[in-house]
Amino acid sequence: QEQVELQEGLPNRLSGLGAGRPVRLFCQDECRIGLMPITRHRITLPGVKPIQTAKPGYQYFYLYGAVEPETGQRFFTEHERLNSDCFQVFLDRFAEAFPHSHNVMILDNGRFHKAKKLSIPKNVDLVFLPPYSPELNPVERLWQDLKDQLAFDFYEHLSILRQKTRIALSRYTDKAIASLTGYDYLLEAASALSS
């Protein structure tokens, strides 16, 4: 029920924001990327099992990301932890990257997203998804696609994985991001904002 209410009520919820500035709609999420090998199913001949080099690794970093489903524009930062301090840095840098618009950010209910010590930039509004509804956040699809590109490779050092991740992110076009993240309910809300 909450999911339907969010999808149908989002345009009304966003009306009146911006105080004369254009309003843009972003979706935000985080993704952990580390040295533990990412595995995926592979097609092989009957009876043949795929072989993959695997050496457990416990070093990782986090990507914090926001994407605009309507245009495919995006913003990413890398952090060592998943906490409110890193989220604050992400918010501040995001606000600086899009200073001429009022930016609505749809995100999940992670505790660090709601920390009392957070200082939300003036050109950012946070809209929280209903609990346990990752299917409403299209950034999840982007992370899945990114991990598909990193799957099966074996990385000795985190620095090499970071570089590979940055290269993979840089290859996405606006069109590709919009294709992955352009959920109908978000595009309708964005369209209502601009009308």
Image: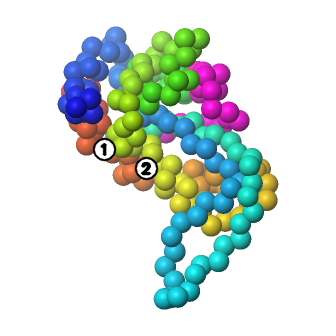
Whether the magenta-drawn stretch holds residue 109 is answered as no
Q: Amino acid at mark 1?
A: Tyr
Residue 163 falls left or right of residue 24:
right
In the rendered image, the vertical position of residue 176 relative to residue 95, given as above or below: below
Q: Which residue is mark 1?
A: 183
Q: Farthest residue toward the right?
A: 157
Rendering quarter of residue 106: top left
Image position, residue 143 (x, y; %): 51, 49
Image position, residue 77 (x, y; %): 62, 36
Specify the label residue 120 is tagged with: none
**Dot 2: element:** helix
Tag count: 2
In the rendered image, the vertical position of residue 185 relative to residue 15, given as above or below: below
Q: Amino acid at mark 2?
A: Arg
- Could you tell which of marks 1 and 2 lies nearer the N-terminus? 2
Q: Quadrant of the N terminus?
A: top left
Image position, residue 110 (x, y; %): 50, 28
Task: Using the image as rendered, state which of residue 68 and residue 137 is in the foreground.
Answer: 137
Residue 179 falls left or right of residue 117:
left
**Dot 1: element:** loop
Task: Using the image as rendered, state which of residue 133 and residue 19 is in the foreground.
Answer: 133
Rendering quarter of residue 6: top left
Q: Is residue 23 visible?
A: yes
Image position, residue 43 (x, y; %): 49, 79
Q: Residues within 10 Å of mark 1 (few under 14, many from 20)?
A: some
Q: Residue at x 35, y 15 (%)?
A: 18
Q: Residue at x 44, y 43 (%)?
A: 139
Q: Which residue is mark 2?
A: 141
How far apart are the alpha carbons under marks 1 and 2? 11 Å
Q: Which residues are magenta?
A: 73-92
Q: Is residue 119 visible?
A: no
Whether the magenta-drawn stretch holds residue 76 is answered as yes
